């Protein structure tokens, strides 16, 4: 059967490949707010089932969800369901034409026919005699079924006589009549859910229906119920073993279920009639209150019976309660922490700190990391919380140190014996040794801790938050409780208590009502008053003390498990259970069975006690009933008077009966006990009252005895007779036996005993005939459970929509059972109770310590090694594996066999046999067993290489049995996701229509999240269930909202972007707390903090398998903000929010740049604007790196939008500002500190230039200003500090190279000093040798002429060689020899000259293009030093190590500075100014024209130097006459104008700043355009394949060197071809990528290709190498720095003179 998918385009994603589609309107009602609500059926379809292939038809049996929606939600999610009048189109409107086709007269005639047919059928049914029904009756029923299929006639069939007719037909022994009744019911139930529910409910509520129905009739009616409910709730529990529920109990569950659904329909109909004109609001309110109370009581009854039928209460009593979730359910908890207190037997002895907080008390990993960083001190003990590389969770160590590296913490670990680096959030502080205490494993301490936490001795973990995350989890802050409400029960608590009061009958009920009346001033208590009572807590405590004595065991068990008893009962007040008898009785069956097993092993020493007496003694005082039953049935005929009271007692307290039956599941040695028990059970079956006992709950013990191969034949015969008798009396138990697999067990018993078992064949046939009934029972159990789950989910959805409390008793109990298994870990210690080994039991713990370096080693003969596992009851093994190691050689197992059995003595079934390969490390022995084996034994039959003993490194057992949690989690998350995605779409629609709705989004979200937080705290049992709900809510509500509010509209502005813009605009006005701007800003901050506060725990980074080196060099110390911003955060929300914030910042910065870029104070204003954006980012999103990175990217995006010349102007302004602040910081004092602060703010802003195209122009201007600064005032520590902070902003690293060249110059100066000393020593040595030779020649003159000539000839030749050598150097080194002689023999102090060697590779060529000729421009005492330095540098170039390098030649420049002494003043001047002033030592006046002619300097350079000298502080005057139009310089007369006579006078020319709009800036733009052209041409030539980025850079540089090239003007301004480097090319590539001209390949980002055409302005090009034979040697320009140790050149005349000493 297929239906049409009409609203295919409206789909809501619910999961991977799963979508929901709106199908049709079911009903409507008036909501709690007075607005109409509509119940819409949503189809749930998987991918491929939704007709994507073109078909619009889907299976009508597909799963669906019923969801109440408001008009706005329907308009936002499926507007096509609204008609032209704005009302929802329902199915009634579509079929109105069909219904109207029946004329009223025709319809009246048909109603008359139906009534007469009903009367005739009743008469024919009464007249029916015999087993074969008459044909007229069948024909009449057939006609009635045809009329029942007509929808307008449905009202006629609601006549009570129809129900009587159906009851008689269902009670008929004839199959055809029962079949006809079922057909009529199907026809009536086919119209709608309301009619179906009413018909079935009416049938089920008939008085004594069970008495009129036999087994077949009841099964027929159950089949109808199953067919009717299957289409409503198609839910699968595949893999989950459902209990065997007998038909009697199943029929009761069906009645309860139908009653609940009927009341729920009535509630919805009452809400739909709220707008009816004939009903008053008071009447409707009273009627609705009555229905709500009745529905809550009925739902509580259904949950109570369903819990007992599913036997969840027994499992709960064995497992104990689990911990409630603590903290925010939307923030994931650390993976290492369990949801509650662990069982004592599963925990080793651990240690904890007395005064340090654990990680569970913090809401986020970052907050905990900050706490650990501040609290941890060297020497403290720490414990590892996560597995990280070589360190495992649980390892302890001693904290040593920390630094700024990654990871930052060094710990000496005990497990490895060496230090290892980890992260802050991975550590738990144990403290110093005196702060650590041992954790006791006793269960009472765990219970004490739980009680103290429940009382409230410690604050919840989520209440503590640092100030930086003040708004992190506002939804978990407790609301202010009314003092009056705290003294009374809530309505939910009172209704839960009222449920037990209504359970009482007769006198007990009246006594409890009397207690209520006495405490409520004698008020008359009817049902309406009871529902609205305000019950004080003291009265509730009195009632809870009075109720346990008046309730039966079933109701008492419910009372002890309910919430109101746990909160106000005696157990909660006194700390001890008030009624331990029932709790002990629940544990008695298993203990008694264990005692019986022990008795089987021990032979009784005394024969006076029978086995039944020993069983009674083991059960306690309640076991006396066993002996009473034996005495009542001992005589020939059972005594009715004695047996019936005992049966009534067993009905009230069935625990002894269950113990009696479960004693059959004991070893075969208990034959007397088995026979005695079977004789009692056989006689119990004969009593009708005994059929009400829970036989099905202990039927598995009978099956265990039946399957056991050791069961004695006599016991087996008695057991078969008993089961045959039980199945004959009630065929329900034949169905139960069929579900338990009794047919196969009986067949095996017949084979074993050769068919000699009385009634065994008949019992097997009886069980086989119930196969279809067993299938029906399983299906109906599944349908009822699925229907209850759907109703619970509907109540949760109604709770979400109305925010009204859930007043259903045991609602939390039902959810607790559905969530069982959510916190169960798949571990081996959860699966087995005890482990035994064949030898060396003291080393058995090594099998489960999870350490592959330890092992269990056997000690015995070959083939005798065994490991025995005693499994937990009902555990189904999913996987069993051994861990071995090939390094064990002959100790490694070679063949392993696994056996299973019911006990350690019956391990006869071989489950698997495995041959182990020598290279194996993990051997899987068992997988996905379908049968439960209580005992598993692993036998090592053979070892590798013929070894004797074996070594096992570990044992892994996986296999908690399947629970309902996966099914319920899927349904809960699916309903939650649909509800919140629909709501998110509706809210988004409202915000899209009016952006001001964003101001209310914070309170809306906070309310929704607080609701889910409170729901999880009240109803969900553990952390995993709460976290699953929280994650679903966050993903379904917050993620779509963030995506919608951050999506830009047609104007390119998103709603959240608009809101953030408004926040930035009114930020200054918000400082007044009473202003509207302050309230507005507060709402915006609360919204943004709420959206970004969820921060999952950071997972350890993925590392390689190889161990990490111990040295700190191997650690990654780079701080990558992009990786920090994205690691561990919700990708979709954070990505959308950061993208929106980036767009806002980009718009803000772009507007600022557009309007302020020409201002003189542009840079300070920009820095202030950037600082305000940083503060706003911290206010809105907290200190999160993702948003700081978005802020930087936004500023970078705004800079990228600027045209090239405007961007160049901005970069020049920043370079100028930095230059001014560096020079201003030299002032010192408060003004200097202020300059340093301004410099720091500017540097933080400049960091954004890194990686942008603007960095190239910024480096260009910064290089110029830095060169003038270094050469004008010298270097300082601040230069290096600035470059260290903004180093990434210089792609060519030219400023760094400039500082490095200064360091090289200083080293050369030191070498030159040593070189001068060596030359001086050589000259002095020559003088001494010459004097010795002269003295020797004088002394030898008397010795003879021949010898003198010879000697003289020898001396003349030597002198001639020296002179020749000297003569050869006269032409070029004449002044040097003169200077050297003066230097060597001058009696005064020489000026100290320092030479700076500047390389054109890093220093700006414009600064070193003016060369200096020392021969013509400098005095002799300076020229000599420069010449000697040239000789030193040339000789240094001739070293063998430098022969292969390019020879550099020196060329002197005018750059540099000097200090001159002028009277009592020290003049700080430039080299040009020094040269100019030294002229006045010889001349009184100098014309500017002569200076220009002598120096060869441009006029602007010389005038720049003359300006400070002729200022008010300078020593010169400039006179302009007709003879000297350029001016005449002379020394200023001191009497004309007073000036300072002492101290330092700075006359160095002021810094000249460039303009981006000048020719140089345009040349930079031309170079950028040329490079863009080259890149585009090269990529076009390579087509779609593209080029690797490194190869592209090489090709562009090669093309730049070889041509085409820019015009000559560009060459002259940029220097030679080497001025274009790889950084320039990469900058242009980034520019083209941003423009979209160049694109990256998706799979290989390093590959670039041409994307779209782009118009690039290409300058005129010409060859870059105009006919040159080869490259010239690289030039090295020099400047000098002159210092003096005295004033040797002061003029002797009265005229002031200038002396150079630096």
Image (cartoon, rainbow, N blue to C red):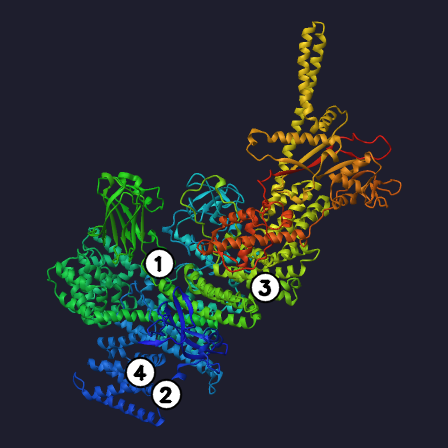
Residue found at x 25% / y 87%: 143
Where disc 1 sits, the SS reads helix
- Quarter residue 638 falls in: bottom left
Residue at coordinates 30% horizontally, 66% vertically from top-left? 653
Give the residue pinned by disc 1: 319
In this rendering, the answer to whether 545 lies above or below 1410 is: below
Q: Give the alpha-carbon distance from disc 1 to disc 2, as whole Å.
A: 58 Å
Pointer 4: what residue?
188
User: Which x, y percent locates residue 1278?
Assistant: 65, 43
Q: Earlier in the sequence, mark 3 or mark 1?
A: 1
Q: Which tag is nearer the camera, tag 1 or tag 4? A: 4
Dot 2 or dot 4: first in sequence order is 2
Residue 263 in view (yes/no)? yes
Residue 1563 image offset from top left, x and y in percent: 63, 52
* Nearer to me, 398 or 74: 74
* Number of dots carrying numbers: 4
> Which residue lies most toward the right here?
1535
Q: Residues within 10 Å of mark 3 (few under 14, many from 20)?
A: many
Dot 4: within a 10 Å radius of its alpha carbon, few (fewer than 14), some, or many (20 or more) residues?
Answer: many
The span from disc 3 to disc 1 (Cα, nearest Å) is 52 Å
Residue 809 can be seen in this image: no
**Which residue lies under the disc numbered 3?**
1060
Nearer the N terminus, badge 1 or badge 4? 4
Q: Secondary structure at mark 2?
A: helix
**In the orientation shown, which residue stands out farthest toward the top?**
1343
Picture coordinates of residue 540 (x, y %)? Answer: 44, 68
Category of crowding for the residue at label 2, using alpha-carbon neighbours closer than 10 angstroms: few (below 14), some (14–19), many (at least 20):
some
Dot 1 or dot 2: first in sequence order is 2
- What's the CA distance linking mark 2 and mark 4? 17 Å
Out of 432 and 1504, give the one closest to the viewer: 1504
Of circles 4 and 3, which is in front? 3
């Amino acid at each position: 059967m297929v239906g049409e998918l009409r609203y295919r385009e409206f789909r809501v994603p619910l999961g991977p490949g799963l979508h929901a589609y709106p199908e049709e309107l079911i009903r409507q009602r008036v909501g709690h707010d007075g607005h109409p609500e509509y119940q819409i059926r949503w189809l749930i379809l998987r991918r491929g089932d939704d007709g994507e292939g073109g078909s619009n038809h889907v299976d009508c049996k597909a799963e669906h969800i019923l969801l109440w929606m408001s008009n706005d939600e329907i308009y936002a999610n499926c507007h096509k369901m609204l008609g032209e009048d704005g009302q929802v189109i329902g199915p009634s409107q579509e079929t109105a034409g069909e219904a109207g086709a029946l004329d009223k007269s025709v319809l009246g005639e048909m109603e008359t026919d139906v009534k007469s047919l009903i009367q005739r059928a009743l008469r024919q049914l009464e007249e029916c005699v015999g087993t074969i029904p008459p044909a007229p009756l069948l024909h009449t029923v057939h006609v009635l079924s045809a009329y029942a299929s007509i929808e307008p006639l449905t009202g006629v069939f609601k006549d009570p006589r129809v129900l009587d007719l159906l009851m008689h037909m269902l009670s008929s022994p004839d199959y055809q009549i029962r079949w006809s009744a079922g057909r009529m019911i199907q026809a009536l139930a086919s119209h709608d859910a309301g009619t179906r529910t009413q018909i079935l409910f009416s049938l089920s509520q008939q008085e004594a229906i069970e008495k009129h129905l036999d087994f077949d009739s009841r099964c027929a009616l159950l089949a109808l119920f199953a067919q009717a409910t299957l289409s409503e709730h198609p839910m699968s529990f595949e893999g989950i073993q459902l209990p065997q529920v007998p038909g009697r109990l199943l029929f009761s569950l069906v009645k309860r279920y139908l009653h609940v659904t009927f009341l729920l329909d009535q509630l919805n109909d009452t809400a739909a009639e709220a707008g009816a004109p004939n009903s008053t609001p008071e009447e409707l309110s009273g009627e609705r209150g009555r229905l709500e109370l009745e529905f809550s009581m009925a739902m509580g009854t259904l949950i109570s019976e369903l819990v007992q039928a599913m036997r969840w209460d027994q499992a709960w009593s064995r497992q104990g309660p689990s911990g409630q979730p603590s903290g925010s359910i939307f923030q994931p908890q650390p993976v290492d922490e369990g949801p509650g207190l662990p069982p004592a037997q599963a925990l080793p002895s651990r240690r904890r700190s007395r005064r340090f907080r654990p990680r569970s008390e913090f809401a986020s990993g970052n907050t905990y990391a900050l706490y650990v960083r501040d609290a941890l001190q060297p020497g403290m003990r720490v414990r590892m919380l996560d597995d990280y590389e070589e360190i495992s969770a649980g390892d302890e160590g001693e904290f040593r140190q920390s630094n700024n590296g990654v990871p930052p913490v060094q710990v000496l670990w005990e497990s490895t014996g060496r230090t290892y680096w980890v992260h802050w959030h991975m550590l738990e502080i144990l403290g110093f040794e005196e702060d650590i205490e041992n954790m006791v494993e006793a269960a009472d301490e765990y219970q004490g801790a739980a009680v103290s936490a429940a009382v409230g001795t410690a604050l919840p973990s989520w209440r503590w938050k640092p100030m930086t995350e003040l708004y992190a989890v506002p939804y978990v802050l407790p609301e202010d409780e009314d003092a009056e409400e705290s003294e009374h029960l809530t309505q939910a608590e009172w209704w839960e208590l009222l449920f037990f009061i209504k359970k009482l009958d007769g006198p007990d009920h009246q006594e409890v009502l009397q207690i209520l009346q006495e405490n409520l001033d004698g008020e008359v208590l009817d049902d309406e008053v009871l529902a609205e009572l305000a019950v004080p807590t003291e009265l509730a405590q009195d009632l809870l003390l009075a109720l346990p004595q008046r309730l039966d065991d079933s109701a008492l068990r419910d009372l002890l498990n309910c919430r109101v008893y746990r909160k106000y009962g005696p157990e909660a007040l006194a700390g001890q259970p008030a009624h331990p008898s029932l709790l002990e009785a629940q544990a008695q069956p298993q203990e008694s069975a264990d005692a019986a097993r022990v008795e089987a092993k021990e032979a009784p020493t005394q024969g006076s006690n029978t086995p039944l007496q020993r069983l009674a003694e083991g059960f306690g005082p309640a076991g006396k009933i066993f002996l009473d039953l034996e005495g009542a049935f001992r005589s020939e005929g059972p005594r009715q008077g004695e047996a019936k009271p005992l049966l009534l007692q067993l009905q009230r307290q069935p625990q002894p009966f269950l113990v009696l039956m479960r004693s059959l599941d004991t070893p075969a040695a208990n034959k007397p006990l088995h026979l005695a028990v079977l004789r009692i059970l056989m006689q119990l079956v004969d009593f009708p009252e005994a059929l009400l006992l829970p036989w099905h709950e202990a039927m598995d013990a009978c099956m265990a005895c039946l399957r056991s191969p050791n069961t004695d034949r006599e016991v087996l015969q008695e057991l078969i007779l008993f089961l045959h008798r039980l199945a004959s009396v009630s065929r329900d138990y034949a169905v139960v036996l069929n579900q338990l697999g009794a047919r196969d067990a009986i067949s095996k018993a017949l084979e074993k005993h050769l068919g000699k078992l009385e009634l065994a064949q008949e019992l097997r046939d009886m069980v086989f005939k119930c196969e279809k009934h067993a299938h029906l029972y399983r299906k109906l159990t599944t349908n009822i459970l699925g229907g209850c789950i759907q109703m619970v989910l509907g109540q949760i959805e109604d709770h979400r929509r109305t925010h009204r409390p859930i007043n259903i008793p045991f609602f939390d109990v039902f959810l607790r059972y559905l969530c069982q298994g959510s916190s169960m870990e798949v571990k081996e210690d959860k699966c087995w109770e005890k482990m035994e080994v064949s030898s060396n039991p003291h080393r058995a713990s090594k099998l489960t310590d999870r350490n592959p370096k330890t092992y269990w080693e056997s000690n015995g003969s070959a083939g005798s090694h065994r490991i025995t596992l005693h499994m937990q009851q009902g555990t189904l093994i999913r996987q069993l594996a051994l861990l071995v190691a090939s390094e064990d050689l002959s100790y490694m197992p070679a063949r392993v066999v696994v056996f299973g059995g019911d006990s350690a003595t019956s391990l006869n079934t071989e489950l698997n046999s495995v041959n182990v390969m020598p290279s194996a490390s993990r051997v899987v022995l068992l997988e996905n067993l379908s049968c439960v084996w209580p005992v598993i034994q692993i036998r090592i039959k053979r070892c590798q290489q013929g070894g004797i003993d074996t070594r096992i490194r570990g044992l892994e057992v996986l296999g908690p049995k399947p629970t309902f949690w996966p099914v319920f989690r899927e349904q809960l998350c699916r309903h939650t996701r649909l509800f919140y995605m629909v709501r998110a779409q509706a809210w988004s629609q409202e915000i899209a229509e009016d952006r001001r709705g964003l101001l209310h989004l914070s309170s809306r979200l906070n309310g929704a999240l607080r609701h889910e937080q409170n729901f999880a705290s009240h109803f969900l049992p553990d952390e995993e269930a709460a976290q699953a709900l929280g994650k679903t809510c966050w993903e379904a509500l917050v993620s779509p909202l963030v995506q919608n509010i951050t999506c830009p509209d047609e104007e390119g502005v998103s709603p959240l972007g608009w809101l953030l813009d408004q926040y930035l605009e009114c930020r200054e006005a918000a400082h007044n707390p009473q202003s509207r701007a302050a309230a507005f800003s507060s709402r915006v901050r609360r919204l943004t903090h709420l959206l970004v506060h969820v921060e999952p725990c950071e997972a350890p980074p993925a590392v390689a398998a190889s161990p990490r080196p111990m040295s700190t060099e191997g650690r990654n110390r780079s701080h990558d903000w992009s990786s920090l911003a994205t690691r561990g955060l919700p990708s979709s929300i954070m990505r959308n929010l950061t993208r929106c914030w980036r767009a806002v910042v980009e718009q803000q910065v772009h507007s600022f740049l557009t309007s302020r870029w020409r201002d003189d104070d542009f840079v300070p204003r920009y820095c202030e604007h950037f600082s305000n954006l940083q503060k706003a980012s911290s206010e809105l999103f907290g200190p999160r790196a993702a948003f700081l990175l978005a802020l930087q990217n936004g500023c970078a995006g705004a800079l990228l939008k600027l045209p090239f010349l405007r961007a160049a102007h901005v970069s020049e302004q920043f370079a100028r500002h930095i230059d001014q602040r560096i020079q201003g910081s030299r002032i010192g004092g408060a003004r200097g500190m202020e300059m340093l602060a301004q410099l720091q703010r500017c540097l933080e802003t400049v960091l954004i230039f890194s990686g942008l195209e603007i960095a190239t122009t910024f480096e260009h201007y910064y290089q110029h200003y830095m060169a003038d600064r270094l050469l004008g005032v010298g270097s300082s520590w601040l230069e290096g500090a600035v470059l260290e902070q903004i180093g990434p902003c210089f792609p060519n690293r030219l400023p760094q190279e400039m500082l490095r060249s200064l360091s090289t110059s200083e080293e050369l100066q030191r070498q030159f000093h040593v070189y001068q000393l060596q030359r001086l020593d050589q000259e002095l040595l020559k003088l001494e040798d010459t004097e010795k030779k002269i003295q020797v020649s004088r002394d030898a003159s008397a010795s003879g002429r021949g010898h003198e000539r010879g000697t003289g000839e020898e001396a003349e030749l030597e002198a001639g060689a020296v002179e020749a050598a000297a003569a050869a150097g006269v032409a070029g080194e004449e002044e040097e020899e003169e200077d050297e002689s003066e230097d060597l023999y001058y009696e005064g102090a020489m000026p100290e000259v320092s030479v700076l060697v500047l390389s054109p590779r890093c220093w700006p060529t414009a600064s070193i293009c003016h060369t200096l000729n020392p021969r013509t421009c400098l005095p002799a005492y300076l020229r000599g030093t420069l010449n000697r330095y040239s000789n030193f540098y040339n000789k240094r170039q001739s070293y063998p190590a430098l022969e292969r390098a390019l020879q550099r030649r020196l060329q002197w420049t005018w750059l540099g500075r000097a200090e001159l002494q002028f009277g009592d003043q020290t003049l700080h001047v430039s080299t040009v100014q020094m040269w100019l002033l030294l002229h006045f030592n010889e001349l009184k006046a100098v014309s500017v024209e002569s200076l220009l002619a002598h120096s060869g300097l441009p006029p602007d350079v010389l005038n720049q130097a003359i300006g400070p000298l002729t200022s008010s502080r300078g020593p010169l005057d400039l006179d302009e006459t007709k003879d000297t139009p350029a001016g005449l310089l002379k020394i200023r007369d001191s009497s004309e104008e007073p000036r300072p006579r002492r101290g330092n006078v700075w006359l160095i020319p002021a810094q000249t700043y460039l303009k981006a709009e000048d020719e140089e800036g345009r040349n930079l733009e031309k170079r950028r355009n040329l490079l863009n052209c080259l890149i585009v041409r090269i990529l076009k030539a390579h087509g779609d394949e593209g080029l690797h980025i490194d190869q592209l850079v090489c090709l562009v540089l090669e093309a730049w060197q070889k041509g085409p090239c820019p015009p000559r003007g560009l060459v002259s301004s940029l220097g030679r071809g080497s001025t274009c480097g790889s950084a320039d090319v990469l900058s242009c590539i980034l520019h083209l990528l941003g423009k979209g001209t160049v694109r990256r390949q998706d799979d290989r980002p390093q590959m670039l290709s041409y994307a779209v055409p782009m118009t690039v302005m290409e300058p005129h090009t010409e060859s870059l190498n105009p006919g040159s034979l080869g490259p010239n040697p690289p030039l090295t320009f020099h400047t000098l720095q002159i210092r003096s140790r005295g004033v040797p050149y002061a003029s002797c005349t009265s005229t002031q003179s200038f002396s150079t000493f630096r």
